[in-house]
Amino acid sequence: MLTVLLACATPDPEAHIPDRGASSTLTGTEDPELAVDSGSADTATTVEDDDDDEGADEDPADEPTPDAPTWVCDEEIRNGSEICDDAAFGVPDPYEPRALVCVTGEGGVGYVASNTGPTMSDGIARCQGWEENGQDAWDHLQYVEQLTCGYDGQVLEVDLEAWRGQTMWVGVHDHPLGGGHMTHVCIAHQE
């Protein structure tokens, strides 16, 4: 299979979103064990190799790595009927690695933040509270990391060691330039 990538000089629509870390994407050439596992056989998400070329030459470098980690979702969130949704989670102490995982690649912005939105009319504070007040969450969130979810299984390792023992929020909101609704993300640990 021949893959061609073309590049052109177009303005980056995400230039105003700070890049606070490098992301990696699980692909079909990587070990399926690396794929996101939400902890339940009914909802486990894996990334499959969709190469239908039987007998095609395979590169030995594409062989699975037996000791590669599996990311397992702890807290999951999706911006269903709202522009922004989030959930609180505790950063472990002693610290263990965490990752922000795009369970679906619908174009929304997954994030880890040190704050959440204002208290809503139902008495619960969450990022949707800004929407309820006619504001945009991205103007108020104190991001620690963020990732535009362009692929199912996209992973951004997040260094939260400085916040060990504290409460943080994992969330997802529409892209500020449009789109990104129904994006599903999680904060995950390694197995």
Image (cartoon, helix red, strand yellow):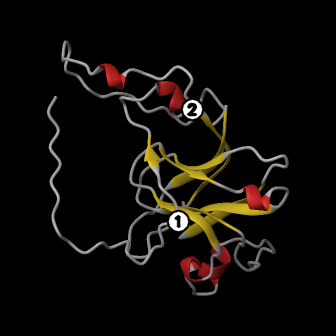
Alpha-carbon neighbours of circle 2 within 10 Å: few (<14), some, or many (≥20)? some
Position of 127 compared to 109: left or right? right
Instruction: Identify the secondary structure beneath mark 1.
Output: loop
Residue 72 pos. (x, y %): 64, 37
Query: Which of the 4 image quadrants contains residue 40?
Result: top right
Mark 2 residue type = Ala
Residue 106, x across and y down, in percent: 41, 55
> Where 13 sits versus 24, above or below?
below
Q: Position of residue 18 (x, y in %)?
A: 48, 72
Residue at left 65%, top 75%? Answer: 142
Give the vertical position of 138 relative to 151 (above or below).
below
55 or 172: which is nearer to us? 55
Residue type marked 1 = Arg
Q: Quadrant of the C terminus?
A: top right
Name the residue rendered at 32%, 73% in the picture: 13
Task: Name the disc covering residue 44, or none.
Answer: 2
Determine the residue positioned at 34% across, 27% down: 49
From the viewer's perspective, is 34 left or right of 179? right
Residue, disc 1: 20
Name the mark nearer the viewer: 1 or 2.
Answer: 1
Marks 1 and 2, the one that precedes in the sequence: 1
**Number of residue marks:** 2
